[in-house]
């Protein structure tokens, strides 16, 4: 246990995770979720649920709509034409329309988890199904009115004229493509949450596993149109995050508002199946790349085209991960004079995506190294030799790459040679 102070406590069963917290007088929450990917909500009647044993209250999207909650705090980004990206609201409970399977529609509060879940079955839900868009470019209508072609963001970065010139002069051009499948997060503990309203101070408190309590506090407050000081977040042992517990979820807002509504703490621990339906997903992109080389195998330019499925809504860093994080990584360890990337972020009727395990950078490194391998094959060179010819030398440090990233230090040739020895 030397070096990691928390290990002994955790492996001996003394960890304290979200579901371990129980507050006096707490109620238990359960969400009614959409069984379809795209539909108009014709009717939600929670009256039968209110008549069930142990039920304290129930809420719908209509109950919360007037509060104006759901404006996701997203760093502003511009399209390739200079126009600003439009970010739609993501309400705490769906109102008028659902846009992915698992989207929250209603919330039931009861004296036990079993009572809350049982009451869900009595809610009358009438949906008018609409054609869903399952994949980028797939059949179905617009997910959002502001994006009739379902493209949320058209991103461009890099020096296109320099790249075009390099490809026109290239002795060799190779191509590659990589599909990164959609991934669901499977953390040890699901997003267990306890929400509290403190009427005396007029503030909310959210007990939630997170990858940064301060950032989560700011995001939840933004969703509720409140200053960060009005929402206090407490994070105990997290039980795994991998990116999915970085950002705020609108259902946190519904739970906080529910606590204020009934004047009691509210606890919610999603099942594993519910987590698969509601947690943000990762990856889900198709990247194509080209590499221009001269007769000696020197890299002249890279260019990349990517289509990323961001799902039905933005999370706080969805498009930033797919664009800036990707572009910041595509130079790798190679001294390539020119680079460009064109990326489309596309809406579909699927779970919103978010940063996951490297957050756009693994996708960039994978297509980059695939292209280098393709270049070695085309020129009949050993893969290590082609890399030797193009690695940024230690003597060039500090080095500014063609994608704008600055490297303060590094001896990449020495690392390659050591890796070859260790790999035998």
Image: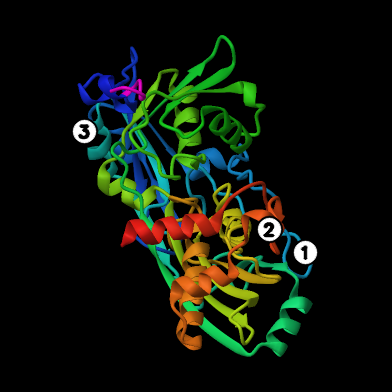
Question: In the rendered structure, which disc, 1 or 3, sits on the residue that comes first in sequence?
Answer: 1
Of circles 2 and 3, which is in front? 2
Q: Nearer the viewer, residue 258 or 231?
A: 231
Asked if labels 2 and 1 touch by Cβ distance under 8 angstroms, the answer is no
On the question of residue 417 being in view, the answer is yes
Decide: is 170 above or below 420.
below
| Quadrant showing the N terminus | top left
Mark on residue 86? 2
**Quadrant of res 172:** bottom right
Decide: is 184 above or below 335.
above
Q: Position of residue 366 (x, y in %)?
A: 46, 66
Residue denoted by label 1: 83
User: Residue most toward the top?
Assistant: 200
Of circles 1 and 3, which is in front? 1
Q: How many marks?
A: 3
**Quadrant of res 132:** bottom left
* Residue drawn at (77%, 77%) of the image: 162
Prevailing secondary structure of the magenta residues: loop
Check disc 1: other Cα within 10 Å, few if <14, some if 14-19, many if 20+. few
Magenta stretch contains residue 2: yes
Q: Nearer the viewer, residue 225 or 178?
A: 178
Asked if labels 3 and 2 touch by Cβ distance under 8 angstroms, the answer is no
Q: Position of residue 279 (x, y in %)?
A: 40, 47
Residue denoted by label 3: 114
**Quadrant of res 264:** top left
Check disc 3: other Cα within 10 Å, few if <14, some if 14-19, many if 20+. few
State the separation of the CA atoms marked 1 and 2. Answer: 9 Å
The region drawn magenta spans 1-6
């Amino acid at each position: 246990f030397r070096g990691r102070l928390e290990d002994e406590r955790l492996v001996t069963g003394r960890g304290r995770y979200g579901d371990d917290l129980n507050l006096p007088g707490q109620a238990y929450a359960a969400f009614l979720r959409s069984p379809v990917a795209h539909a108009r909500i014709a009717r939600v009647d929670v009256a039968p649920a209110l008549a069930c044993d142990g039920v304290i209250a129930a809420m719908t999207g209509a109950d919360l709509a007037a509060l104006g909650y759901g404006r996701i705090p997203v760093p502003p980004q511009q399209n390739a034409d200079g126009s600003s990206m439009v970010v739609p609201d993501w309400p705490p409970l769906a109102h008028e329309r659902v846009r992915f399977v698992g989207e929250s529609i209603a919330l039931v509060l009861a004296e036990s988890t079993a009572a809350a879940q049982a009451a869900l079955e009595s809610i009358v839900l009438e949906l008018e199904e609409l054609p869903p868009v399952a994949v980028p470019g797939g059949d179905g209508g617009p997910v959002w009115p502001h994006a009739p072609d379902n493209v949320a963001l058209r991103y461009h970065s890099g020096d296109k004229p320099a790249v075009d010139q390099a490809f026109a002069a290239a002795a060799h051009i190779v191509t590659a493509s990589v599909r990164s499948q959609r991934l669901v997060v499977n953390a040890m503990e699901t997003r267990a949450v306890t929400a509290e309203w403190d009427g005396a101070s007029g503030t909310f408190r959210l007990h939630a596993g997170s990858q940064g309590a301060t950032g989560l506090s700011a995001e939840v407050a933004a969703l509720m149109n409140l200053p960060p000081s009005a929402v206090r977040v407490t994070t105990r042992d997290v039980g795994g995050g991998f990116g999915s517990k970085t950002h705020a979820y609108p259902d946190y807002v519904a739970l906080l508002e529910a606590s204020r509504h009934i004047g009691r703490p509210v606890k919610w621990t999603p099942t594993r199946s519910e987590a698969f339906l509601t947690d943000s997903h990762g990856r889900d992109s198709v990247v194509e790349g080209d590499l221009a080389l001269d007769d000696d195998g020197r890299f002249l330019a890279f260019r990349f085209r990517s289509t990323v499925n961001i799902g039905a809504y933005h999370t706080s860093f969805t498009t930033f991960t797919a664009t800036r994080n990707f572009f910041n990584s595509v130079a790798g360890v190679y001294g390539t004079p020119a680079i460009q990337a064109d990326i489309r972020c596309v809406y579909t009727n699927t779970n919103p995506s978010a940063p996951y395990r490297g957050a756009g950078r693994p996708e960039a490194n994978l297509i980059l190294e695939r292209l280098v391998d393709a270049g070695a094959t085309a020129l009949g060179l050993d893969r290590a030799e082609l890399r030797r010819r193009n690695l940024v030398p230690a003597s060039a440090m500090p080095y500014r790459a063609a994608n704008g990233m600055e490297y303060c230090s590094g001896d990449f040739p020495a690392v390659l040679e050591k890796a070859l020895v260790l790999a035998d």
